[in-house]
Image: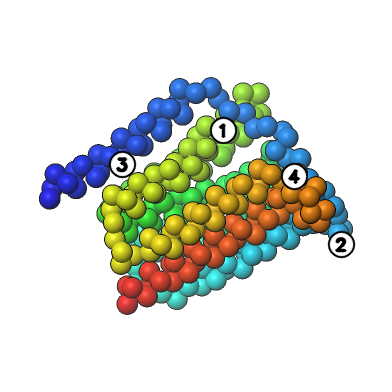
Amino acid sequence: MKSVRLYKAVSLVVVFFIAAVTLYLIDPIAQDLAYHRFSDCRSMFGIPHFMDVISNIPFIVVGYLGVRLVQKSYKKYTATYFVMLFVLFSGVFLTGLGSMFYHCSPNNFTLIFDRLPMTFVFTSLFALIISDYVDRRVGAWVFYLFLTIGVYSIFYWYYTEIIGVGDLRLYAFVQFFPIVCTPLILAVYRNDKLYTKELIYVFAAYIVAKLFEHFDVLIYNFTGFISGHTIKHLISALAIYLMYKMICKNSKLLR
């Protein structure tokens, strides 16, 4: 049994180091300034990029609901687990506000306020998954480590942009490594009593949202009234809501 647990742990560590080394070996990734040019530039009620701005409201709503849920059920959790959940939903709430601010005036500086709270969401959700499926102590260690790396990655990226050698590699690692690693965790640490099905729905919705983001211009030209980026916000908010329901389910299991 110990050898099986060791094999599972080693497999995750190997994936981590492969991803880290691969990221280190590739050239620095600068922020493409075309990223800030969105297809729907319409202003309404004095708000620039109106649709991309207001489509962030669902993040604020779900983030608020999540914070309230965590506050009401805090007695069920350990201190670190409570902090993970609180950071997760606070990150969702702040992502909504930060993305609104960014879309009012898209540029590298305002993008900080969008990406920084997103790192709270990525890192805390990943740590929660490890805590529930792998080990609570490992989850706590991953939470504080990845949260620190995530925050650092944002300011490191912005600093490198200022000095003309923009480097998004570390931020990319924080965002995408959990997406790559989570399916492995679900496959290796199977637990039907947890929220595997809900978690798959969350990640599926996130992937669909990224596809709409990629085809932003094409979708706006096709529909004439809504862009791929706006739809990306709405589907991402759906993924967050599914995550909220997932946490609700897990909270009930702790009763």
| Residue under numbered circle 1 | 168
Mark 4 or 3, closer to the camera:
4
CA–CA distance in space, label 1 to label 4: 26 Å
Q: Earlier in the sequence, mark 1 or mark 2?
A: 2
Packing grade of label 2 (10 A; few <14, some 14-19, many >=20) is few
Residue that appears at 56% across and 33% down:
168
> Which of the pair 199/66 is nearer the observer?
199
| Residue under numbered circle 2 | 45
Mark 2 or 3, closer to the camera:
3
Figure check: 234 above or below 141: below
Q: Which quadrant: the C terminus?
A: bottom left
| Residue under numbered circle 4 | 218
Q: SS for tag 2?
A: loop
Q: Earlier in the sequence, mark 1 or mark 3?
A: 3
Q: How is the image coloured?
A: rainbow
- Are dots 1 and 3 in contact, CB under 8 Å? no
Whether residue 74 is visible to the viewer of this picture, yes or no, is: no
| Residue under numbered circle 3 | 12
- Are dots 2 and 4 in contact, CB under 8 Å? no
> What is the x, y in percent for residue 2?
13, 48
CA–CA distance in space, label 1 to label 2: 35 Å
Q: Is residue 211 left or right of residue 242?
A: right
